[in-house]
Each structure stands twice: as structure tokens, then as C-alpha cells.
Image (cartoon, rainbow, N blue to C red):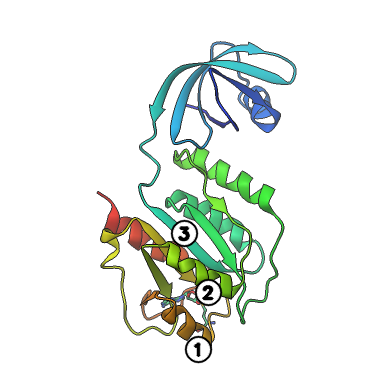
Amino acid sequence: MRRFFIESILDNVILKGDEFEHFKKVLRGKIGDKITCFCGDGKEYLCEVDKIENNYANAKVLEIKNSDKDSSLNVTVFVGIPKGDKMEFLIQKLSELGVSKIIPFESSFTIAKPKNKQDRYKKIAIEACKQCGRTIPLKVLDCVSFKEMLKSLKDYDISYFAYEQAYGGNFDDVKNHKNIALIVGSEGGFSEEESKLILEAGAKIVSLGKRILRCETAPIYAVSVIDYLTKN
Ligand code: SAM
């Protein structure tokens, strides 16, 4: 069934803007159509369209269900700002893998500058929800400094540091934790000094294997392992 994102849902649902255009022009929606809506509260709203005007459609809520597609874990991925549009790729893929938040950070080897693309990022996260079935969109927070990232690690049950020069370290203890941070570098990786500071901040070093993965491959690999080890 077609899925629509609505900012807030009360007794009924109003499709407007892009969601309305999609319903009317792409799907050729009509009165009586059943649609599924979500608003980021972990629920799915089964609705029936009962009114179509020039620039909006109204649907009444028939049934509300708790979603079983959202992750029970809170996984935050700290990523060194990647170049080009790799962040968009990561938002889509990490959404599918159930990640809650991406927090970009600057470090000594990051070349790309923070981008002000929150609207675009939100749109990609919502589209990913429609495709994969989750109802709470992944959030991309504003870029933080390396120091701010280190400070925030204390907010997590465990932090994993994917270090390209790690010789060992794995995710075997992840099952005991719900609130998990993962730190992955940008194309340039980490300086020795930075790796020392991350470890001093309490993160656990992990290797993602003997090959160097690209900065857009590494988080997908790591989160897939976390997801696999924690699924029940
Ligand atoms: N410029 C670095 C180098 O040449 O060694 C490589 C950086 S890599 C492209 C980007 C990030 O992915 C790394 O900083 C690290 O967080 C992660 N990564 C890539 N391969 C990894 C591996 N085998 N083990 C752990 N982390 C890895």
C-alpha cells in the first residue's frame, strides 16, 4: 500500500504539497483509496481518502498500528564529513539499516566543509522510510567539531571506533547495549593523535577487516554487523 509522510496526524490526515502531488498526479489517486500514513511517532495509520480538492486531499484514519519495522536500538553514526554527495548515499543506506542518527564531524583530515542541506537530507530520510517501511525517519544533525564529538560519547552505552589501522577489535559485546555510537572517518581517516583521543574518551576500537573500506562502505559494513548481532 502507498505510504505517505505527514508532519502531524490527528483524527484525519491532510495530504498537501509534494505528498498531494504524488498522490494525485503520479498515483492518480481517487476518493475511496486506502493509503498508509506515518508521522514519525512509531505508528502506522491506515487511512481512506474521502475528499480531494485542488491542492489537498483529506483521508480519515481507519486503524492505527504500532510499527514493527523501527529498530529497538538507538544507533548513532558519527561520520567524518565525506566529499561530494556521499552523505546522501549514507542517509539512504543507513535508514534502511535502522540507524537513528547521523552526526557529521570535522577532523584534521576532513576536506569537505559542512553543508547546509537539512531539507534535502530530511527528504531523503523520508523517502527511505517509505521504501523500507520504518516510520521514524533517520535524523541528520548539524556538523560538530572533533572535540564536541568526543564529549558526546559519554551519552552512549558503548562507542565503537572503526579505525583503519586497528589490528583487532570486534562488535561481540554489542548485544548488551541499546544506545550505541559508531565513529567512522572521512576519506582521509584519522591522525594518530585523534585516534588516541577517541580511545581516551572511552571508545572501543574495532577493525572492519584487513582491507581499507571507503568512507561510505565502512558505516554500512559496521551497522550491518551490529544489526545482525542484535536482531532477535
Ligand atoms: N585514508 C585512510 C588510509 O589510507 O588508511 C583510510 C580512511 S577510510 C577510506 C575511511 C574510514 O573508514 C576510516 O577512517 C575508518 O573509520 C573506516 N575504515 C575503513 N576501513 C576500515 C577497516 N578495515 N577497519 C576499521 N575501519 C575502517
Q: Hey, what amino acid is under mark 3?
A: Thr
User: x, y percentage for residue 45?
Assistant: 47, 25
Label 3 vs label 1: CA separation?
A: 23 Å
Q: Which residue is mark 1?
A: 192
Q: Secondary structure at mark 1?
A: helix
Q: Secondary structure at mark 3?
A: strand
Q: Is residue 26 left or right of residue 65?
A: right
Q: Which residue is mark 3?
A: 76
User: x, y percentage for residue 8?
Assistant: 58, 29
Q: Hey, what amino acid is under mark 1?
A: Glu
* Observer-nearest of 24 and 49: 49
Q: Is residue 200 left or right of residue 231?
A: right
* Observer-nearest of 213 and 174: 174
Q: Earlier in the sequence, mark 1 or mark 2?
A: 2
> In this rendering, does residue 97 appear at all?
yes
Q: Badge 1: few (under 14), some or many (20 or more) residues near its Cα, within 10 Å?
A: few
Residue shown at the point (38%, 40%) measured from the top left: 69
Residue 73's disc is none
Indicate whether 151 appears above or below 13.
Answer: below
Which residue sits furthest right? 54
